[in-house]
């Protein structure tokens, strides 16, 4: 499934071409910890030749007994909101390229989070909202064994040890190398594949003063301790 992804198509269709391709960590320049494109492209599923990736995926499916006359049927579950549902529809279209027939299961918001917490799905599409661009927040919350928002149930003791190592590493350059090692292992394990990072815009009235809009997230800079209204 990871090899079927055309991430650029998601960005072009869903985000008007404004977005970025990344792994678990937000990609540069907005992100401080993400891999540069030339390194990211060496990870499984991130190669720039989509046709080549899909040919490899079809070869895997053929070995498993699937093909154009015998597709694999899956249910793709997501929250019934545009940011989730639209991405899930695109995913279903891309999975057809590798003999997987997906059926959309869009469920109400009140049931969505209980569903993913129970891991009651086969294939899911979700939006990950991160509080800040920091490996601790991302890895401990979404990929560590037993974490509540580890929706896929991924658990790798070696990765957990690396997460602890990067957290205690005071040298930022060395810490980044450990973070990239974690990124590679997450990609190799297809732990929770990131499809794309969208870009959003903000606007405000001229009389709203003193606010600095952050470039690395919708949720940063909202304390507004320095903001004031000139009216």
Image: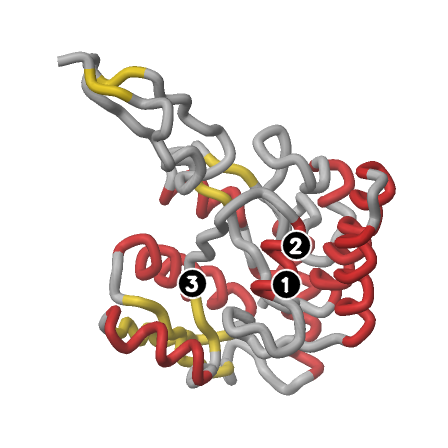
> Toward the viewer: 65 or 139?
139
* Residue at the spot of label 3: 126
**Label 1–label 2 contact, CB within 8 A:** yes
> Toward the viewer: 41 or 194?
194
Q: Residues within 10 Å of mark 1 (few under 14, many from 20)?
A: some
Q: Is residue 169 shown above or below 65? A: above
Q: What residue is at 51 percent from the left and 64 percent from the top?
A: 97
The quarter of the picture where residue 126 lies is: bottom left
* Residue at the spot of label 2: 136
Viewed as shown, does residue 96 lie left or right of 142?
left
- Given this view, does label 3 or label 1 mark the residue nearer the observer? 1
Q: What residue is at 67 percent from the left and 57 percent from the top?
A: 45
The circle drawn on residue 140 is: 1
Question: What's the CA distance linking mark 2 and mark 3?
Answer: 20 Å
Residue that sits furthest to the front in the current view: 225
Looking at the rendered image, the quarter that the N terminus falls into is bottom right
Circle 3: element type: loop
Q: Is residue 217 shown above or below 142? A: above
Circle 2: element type: helix
Residue 120 x %, y %: 42, 85
Q: Residues within 10 Å of mark 3 (few under 14, many from 20)?
A: some
The circle drawn on residue 191 is: none
Mark 3 and mark 1 lie on one chain; the one further toward the N terminus is 3
- Given this view, does label 2 or label 3 mark the residue nearer the observer? 2
Residue 88 x %, y %: 38, 62
Q: Is residue 122 shown above or below 14? A: below
**Label 3–label 1 contact, CB within 8 A:** no
Residue 173 x %, y %: 84, 37
Looking at the rendered image, the quarter that the C terminus falls into is top left
Question: What's the CA distance linking mark 3 and mark 1?
Answer: 18 Å
């Amino acid at each position: 499934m990871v090899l079927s992804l055309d991430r650029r198509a998601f960005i072009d269709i869903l985000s008007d071409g404004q977005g970025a391709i990344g792994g678990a960590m937000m990609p540069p320049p907005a992100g401080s910890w993400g891999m540069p494109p030339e390194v990211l492209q060496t990870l499984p599923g991130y190669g720039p030749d989509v046709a080549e990736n899909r040919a490899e995926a079809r070869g895997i499916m053929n070995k498993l007994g699937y093909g154009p006359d015998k597709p694999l049927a899956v249910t793709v579950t997501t929250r019934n909101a545009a940011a989730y549902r639209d991405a899930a529809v695109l995913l279903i279209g891309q999975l057809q390229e590798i003999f997987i027939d997906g059926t959309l299961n869009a469920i109400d918001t009140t049931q969505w989070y209980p569903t993913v917490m129970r891991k009651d799905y086969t294939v899911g599409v979700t939006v990950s909202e991160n509080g800040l661009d920091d490996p601790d927040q991302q890895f401990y919350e979404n990929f560590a064994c037993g974490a509540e928002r580890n929706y896929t149930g991924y658990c790798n003791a070696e990765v957990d040890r690396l997460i602890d190592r990067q957290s205690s590493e005071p040298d930022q350059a060395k810490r980044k190398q450990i973070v990239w090692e974690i990124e590679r292992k997450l990609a190799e394990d297809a732990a929770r594949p990131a499809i794309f990072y969208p870009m959003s815009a903000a606007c405000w009235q001229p009389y709203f003063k003193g606010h600095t809009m952050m470039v690395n997230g919708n949720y940063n800079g909202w304390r507004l301790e320095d903001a004031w209204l000139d009216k």
